[in-house]
């Protein structure tokens, strides 16, 4: 009898423990969500009314870089771009994605890069944010933001986004750099390419494939955009 009572008590203790852990996890999750919403609300004054084109790089037959674990750049950057669009919309911005899924538009030009830039022109965008993932070798690590060297406002935007990625994610010491790229040099508005990390690095590949980290990266980019607009 004593053995049965001990077994029942052990089961009861285990059940209570599981319930407490579930409550704690829910509390932490809800706390994070509330904190995130407060963060968006605090930044919303800067982005409200802005028209922003968010460009998930690659897509279609062009998957971009692949990590050693098989992670595709096109999928990672689309997930991050969707989160970024969500934050911007919550902040009051009008947001246009250059692709909603794995399909890309080549339009009359037959070139998807041309169509991405034309979209920004058609909607009279204020900002253009292109999201990519890097690949070089397994030693390289960290997100980096690029701008057209001829654009002073592009440089300011890139520096603001880079600063917020460094501040919030605390896993890179990289600086914003100038880059000659079609989607940057053909724009008359501030435009940046955000390389969210190196898929060629196994450790960073795992991070970039994590939905929670994807959302954190998107929020850091959003905070950088708000920082730029707030100091405009």
Image (spheres, helix red, strand yellow):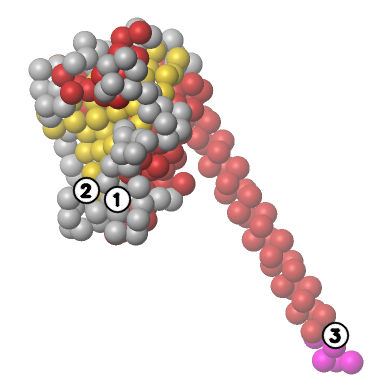
Q: Would you say residue 5 sits in the magenta stretch?
A: yes
Relative side of 145 to 45, left or right: left
Relative side of 229 to 188, left or right: right
Mark 1: which secondary structure?
loop
> What stretch of residues is rendered in magenta?
1-6
- Tag 1 near tag 2, CB within 8 Å: yes
- Tag 2 near tag 3, CB within 8 Å: no
Image coords of residue 207 (percent x, y) = 37, 52
User: Could you tell me which residue is drawn at 64 percent across and 61 percent down?
Assistant: 21
Q: Which residue is mark 3?
A: 5
Q: Which residue is mark 2?
A: 135
Which image quarter: residue 81?
Answer: top left
Spatial CA distance of label 1 from label 2 is 8 Å
- The answer to whether one can see residue 164 in this image is no
Image coords of residue 72 (percent x, y) = 35, 47
Residue placed most toward the observer, 68 or 28: 68
Image coords of residue 114 (percent x, y) = 26, 19
Q: Which residue is mark 1?
A: 66
Residue placed most toward the observer, 103 or 145: 103
Q: Is residue 15 above or below residue 186?
A: below
């Amino acid at each position: 009898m004593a053995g049965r009572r001990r077994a029942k008590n052990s089961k009861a203790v285990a059940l209570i423990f599981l319930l407490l852990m579930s409550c704690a996890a829910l509390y932490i999750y809800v706390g994070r969500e509330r904190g995130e919403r407060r963060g968006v609300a605090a930044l919303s004054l800067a982005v409200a009314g802005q028209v922003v084109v968010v460009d998930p790089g690659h897509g279609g037959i062009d998957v971009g870089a692949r990590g050693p674990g098989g992670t595709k750049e096109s999928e990672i950057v689309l997930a991050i771009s969707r989160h970024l669009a969500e934050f911007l919309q919550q902040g009051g911005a009008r947001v246009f994605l250059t692709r909603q899924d794995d399909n890309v538009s080549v339009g009359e030009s037959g070139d998807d890069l041309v169509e991405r830039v034309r979209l920004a022109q058609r909607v009279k965008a204020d900002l253009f944010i292109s999201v990519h993932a890097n690949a070089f070798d397994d030693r390289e690590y960290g997100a980096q933001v690029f701008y057209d060297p001829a654009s002073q406002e592009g440089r300011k935007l890139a520096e603001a986004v880079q600063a917020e990625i460094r501040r919030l994610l605390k896993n890179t010491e990289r600086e914003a750099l100038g880059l000659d790229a079609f989607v940057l040099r053909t724009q008359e508005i501030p435009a940046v390419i955000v390389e969210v990390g190196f898929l060629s690095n196994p450790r960073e590949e795992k991070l970039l494939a994590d939905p929670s980290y994807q959302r954190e990266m998107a929020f850091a980019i959003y905070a950088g955009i708000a920082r730029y607009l707030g100091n405009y």
